[in-house]
Amino acid sequence: MSRFSPFALVLVSLIFSACGSVQAGDSCERAEEGLCDSDTAALICQGGTFTEIPCRGAGGCLTTDDDGFICNIKPVAGDACPQVMEGQGQCDETNENQLLKCEQGTWAAMECNGCFVSDSSVMCFQE
């Protein structure tokens, strides 16, 4: 059985304010700064470059009153994941026998014999 630290599906960060529009691949300086790129995606500064992170969950990507944003991630295998979630995982909502783990900036699928959350930890049985 593998055990992973829990994480919130909501990512909150400071919004990037600059003249002109920001695009995936543009350079940035402050790690984890970001903004909503659309209703369903955020741009987050990772390794000096803005990376697009899909926001597929309820509400998608929302700008907050305090000039921040909320990205309800709800990942699928192959999506980009924020560096702050590296090594963390969650059960795949579409497959009860699959865990999604953030590895090297991408959500990777991990097969198991049942995935569930217990005491705020994600459990993936591998027998």
Image: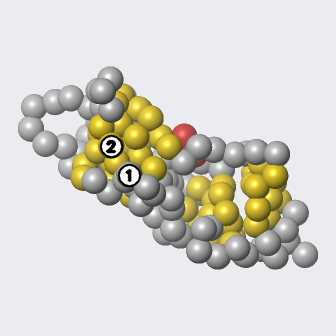
> Horizontal placement of 108 versus 123: left or right?
left
Mark number, residue 62 = 2
Q: Position of residue 127 (x, y in %)?
A: 90, 75
Q: Nearer the viewer, residue 30 or 58?
A: 58
Q: Which residue is mark 1?
A: 59
Amino acid type shown at disc 1:
Gly
Q: Give the CA distance from mark 2 to mark 1.
A: 7 Å
> Horizontal placement of 111 versus 19: left or right?
right
Q: Quadrant of residue 36?
A: top left
User: Which residue is rendered at x = 51% and y = 59% of the image?
Assistant: 74
Q: Nearer the viewer, residue 51 or 69?
A: 69
- With respect to residue 105, does 6 lie above or below? above
User: Which residue is rendered at x = 51% and y = 61% of the image?
Assistant: 75
Circle 2 residues within 10 Å: few <14, some 14–19, many ≥20: many
Please identify the quadrant where the N terminus is shown: bottom right
Q: Position of residue 126 (x, y in %)?
A: 85, 71
Q: Quadrant of residue 5?
A: top right
- Pointer 2 with pointer 1, Cβ within 8 A: yes
Looking at the image, can residue 49 be seen?
A: no
> Horizontal placement of 59 versus 67: left or right?
right
| Secondary structure found at label 1 | loop
Q: Position of residue 10 (x, y in %)?
A: 50, 43
User: Which residue is rendered at x = 69% and y = 46% of the image?
Assistant: 6
User: Which residue is rendered at x = 59% and y = 74% of the image?
Assistant: 94
Q: Position of residue 106 (x, y in %)?
A: 51, 60
Q: How many marks?
A: 2
Quick one: which residue is furthest to the front in this view? 58
Q: Nearer the viewer, residue 32 or 72?
A: 72
Amino acid type shown at disc 2:
Leu
Looking at the image, can residue 85 be seen?
A: yes
Mark number, residue 122 = none
- With respect to residue 13, does 100 lie above or below? below
